[in-house]
Amino acid sequence: MAIRWLTRIIEGLSSITGVVAAICIMAAALIITEGVVARKIFNLSGTWQIELSVFLLIFACFVGAAFVQKEDHHLNVDLILVHLPPKIREITLIVVSITTCFMCALIAWYAWPMWWEAVVEKQYSESIWRPPLWIPYFFLPFGMSLFFLQYIVHIAKKINQFKKNVLDEDVTRAELKDIDIPKLKQSKTTKKIS
């Protein structure tokens, strides 16, 4: 019961941060557009547009990663994976997920002190705008911690499916599943050499 409740919290938080990450991408695009229009049309120089848009994109990248994992939309190199038998493929996916989960934990472990140092030392950006650096520094440890937790949920689901023998028999290549690739026609006529 407690595990289901915890899983719901993690997946809910991943969903919320995914929506916020999408909004951050749109906001970054609008801010950059505003900066270009202000500079080119009204000859105004901006001091905050580029830096804020970079912060928003950092948020989208690191914090939005948990949502992408929740929806199982991360890019996979499946050149060999699609040719493996279902049980071997699932074991491989579980091992890769555990390795990735460990890497997320390691990054979060080292990023939290970096963020705390920026808070304690009151570090600011060296730009004219001078936002406090603890804000963008927070995105990496928070995002990797949430990514780690989302991977724990993913691994638990994969192991439960494996135990229940719920395996995908056929796996289509991810990059080709929605693309119609026309076949090349061979020429029936051959050129005679005289």
Image: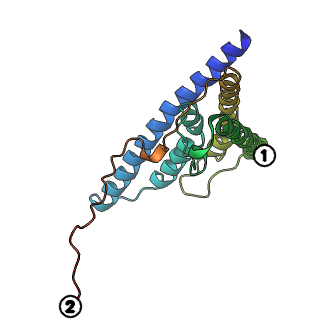
Give 53 or 189, whichever is nearer the viewer: 189
User: Disc 2 on helix, strand or loop?
Assistant: loop
* In this view, 41 is above or below 97: below
Amino acid on which disc 1 is placed: Tyr
> According to the image, label 1 marks what residue?
110
> According to the image, label 2 marks what residue?
194
Amino acid on which disc 2 is placed: Ser
Report the residue that reaches farthest toward the top: 1
Tell me residue 150's x, y (percent): 65, 30
Report the residue that reaches farthest toward the bottom: 194
Please tell me how crowded label 2 is: few (under 14), some (14-19), or many (20+) other residues with Cα within 10 Å: few
Q: Earlier in the sequence, mark 1 or mark 2?
A: 1
Image position of 59 (left or right of 104)? left
Q: Quadrant of residue 165?
A: top right
Please tell me how crowded label 1 is: few (under 14), some (14-19), or many (20+) other residues with Cα within 10 Å: few
Q: Quadrant of residue 183?
A: bottom left
Image position of 187 (left or right of 130)? left
